[in-house]
C-alpha cells in the first residue's frame, strides 16, 4: 500500500493543481489564477525543501553505518591504548631530570 501512495500521491497533487486553474477559468474568475499560482509556488517550495532536508538527513545517517565509521566508533568507544599498561602506585615525586653521575654541561 505504501508504494501506491508514493506514486499516486504526487500525481493526484498535480491533477489537483490543474483542476484549480481550470476551475477558476470555468467560473469566469481567471483573475484569481495569479494569487492561486503564488500559493501553489509557496507550497511547492516548502515541499521540495522538506524533501531535500529529509534526503540529506538520510544520507548523513547512512554515513554512520559504513565500515569506516564503525571502525572509528569502535576505536572511540573502546580505546586500545592504556588498557594494557598497568598503573603503578606512586611512591613519591618523579626522578629529577639531570645528567648522570653529576656530569657537567661544559665538558
Image (cartoon, rainbow, N blue to C red):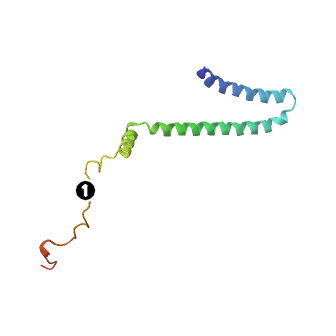
x, y percentage for residue 91?
A: 24, 63
Viewer-nearest residue: 15 or 86: 86
x, y percentage for residue 38?
A: 75, 39
Q: Which residue is drawn at 62% across and 40% down?
A: 49
Q: Residue 25's image quarter?
A: top right
- Figure quadrant of the C terminus: bottom left
Q: Mark 1 points at which residue?
A: 88
Q: Is residue 81 above or below residue 31?
A: below
Q: Residue at x 67, y 39 (%)?
A: 46
x, y percentage for residue 35?
A: 79, 39
Q: Residue at x 43, y 36 (%)?
A: 65
Q: In this view, does 100 lie above or below 2?
A: below
Viewer-nearest residue: 31 or 7: 7
Local crowd size for mark 1, using a 10 Å CA cut-off: few (<14), some (14–19), many (≥20): few
Viewer-nearest residue: 37 or 6: 6
Q: Is residue 60 left or right of residue 31?
A: left
Amino acid at each position: 500500500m505504501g508504494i501506491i501512495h508514493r506514486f499516486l500521491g504526487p500525481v493526484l497533487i498535480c491533477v489537483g493543481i490543474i483542476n484549480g486553474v481550470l476551475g477558476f477559468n470555468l467560473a469566469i474568475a481567471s483573475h484569481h489564477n495569479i494569487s492561486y499560482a503564488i500559493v501553489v509556488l509557496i507550497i511547492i517550495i516548502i515541499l521540495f525543501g522538506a524533501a531535500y532536508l529529509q534526503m540529506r538527513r538520510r544520507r548523513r545517517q547512512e554515513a554512520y553505518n559504513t565500515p569506516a565509521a564503525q571502525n572509528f566508533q569502535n576505536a572511540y568507544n573502546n580505546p586500545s591504548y592504556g588498557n594494557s599498561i598497568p598503573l603503578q602506585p606512586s611512591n613519591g615525586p618523579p626522578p629529577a631530570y639531570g645528567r648522570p653521575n653529576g656530569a657537567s654541561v661544559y665538558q
